[in-house]
Image: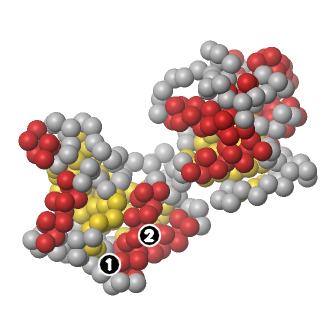
Amino acid sequence: MDNVDLQVLRQVAQWLDDEKRGVVLGTITRTWGSAPRPVGSLVAVRDDGQIAGSVSGGCIEDDLVAKLREGALRLSKPELIRYGVGAEEATRFGLPCGGTLELVLEPLGPASQVQALLAKLAAGARVRRVLDMHSGAVSLHAPEAGADVVQLSATTLITHHGPQWRLLVIGAGQLTQYLANFALALDYQVLVCDPRDEYQPEIPGARITREMPDDCVLAFAPDGHSAIVALTHDPKLDDLALMEALKSPAFYVGAIGSRLNQAKRRARLAEHFGLSEAELARLHGPVGLHIGARTPPEIALSILAHMTAERYGVTLSSSSAGSGAEAGCSL
């Protein structure tokens, strides 16, 4: 879930607990064609017409307020509605021609467990929320592996909340501080690993560990929503992390260093750790996109830009020219 939807839940909790207002929560469950917000996005409507969040350019929100004033949102249980079935209606609701958006509207109450969900999210947990479409009761669970999508059936709506993407950074130098802060702004859960006593970083929102890098990668248990970036400049530490990272399903594995040193690194990983050509081909090194970066924040930006491209399946190779990280590093 992104920060916009987290803010919706926080506003909803205030409306329910502090102001004792009636609230209906809308969740996008399906879209056809282009849509202004992705599946899983939230909008909340208070009983006096106040809105939090969005699911369109404003037209659907306006329609929800109109329904509320007409009494159509006095719901006793969750209800499924659809907008934009035809071109005329799609245009009216700010959707691309022919686009369609489906919402579950859920009247909130004590059984909705909004505060319990927020407490788990504040602790950094990822949560699977199961809504009973008949009773409106909600139960909260640990996420199931590989099941991050919104699932709607005749009986339940399942949504996932909390940090979906994770970043493990090896090394706690100045570049790491910028990379971690940028990643946190993009809703990554960030873990920084550095066993060296000389580095004592303070990065609010990130977790710090003193484990050895290979042990840290194994404990991190990378999955397809994980990125691992090695930034120590020390082959003894970076190579230990990469040895395990390149065998994992992580969607992005990168290491700082010049093109010459990347070639030496690949040779070491093949000779001493037995990594295959296919595993070595997954290494983004020099790490980051070639944007002419020189300073630590610019290099961090180049790395996050490359990670973002990989997340969305956009192929932008850092090896076609000098990468941002290489430009600022001769090691």
User: On the image, which quarter does residue 178 sit in?
Assistant: top right
Q: Which residue lies furthest to the right in this view?
A: 197
Can you identify the residue that label 1 sits on?
109
Which is nearer the eye, 299 or 42? Answer: 299
Q: Which amino acid does label 1 sit on?
A: Gly
Please state if 306 lies on the left or on the right of 19 as rendered. Answer: right
Classify 143 as above or below 71: above
Q: In which quarter of the image is the N terminus?
A: bottom left
Classify 57 as above or below 296: below
Which is nearer the eye, 223 or 289? Answer: 289
Disc 1 element: loop
Discs 1/2, front: 2
Mark 1 → mark 2, Cα distance in angstroms: 14 Å
Total label count? Answer: 2
Please state if 41 lies on the left or on the right of 244 as rendered. Answer: left
Can you identify the residue that label 2 sits on?
10
Q: Earlier in the sequence, mark 1 or mark 2?
A: 2
Q: Report the disc number at residue 320.
A: none
User: Callout 1: 10 Å neighbours few (<14), some, many (20+)?
Assistant: some
Disc 2 element: helix
Residue 246 visible (yes or no): no
- Tell me residue 181's x, y (percent): 64, 50
Please state if 287 lies on the left or on the right of 70 as rendered. Answer: right
Residue depicted at x 49% and y 53%: 144
Residue depicted at x 76% and y 28%: 328
- Tell me residue 202's x, y (percent): 76, 58
Which is nearer the eye, 288 or 157? Answer: 288
Q: Quadrant of the C terminus?
A: top right
User: Callout 2: 10 Å neighbours few (<14), some, many (20+)?
Assistant: some
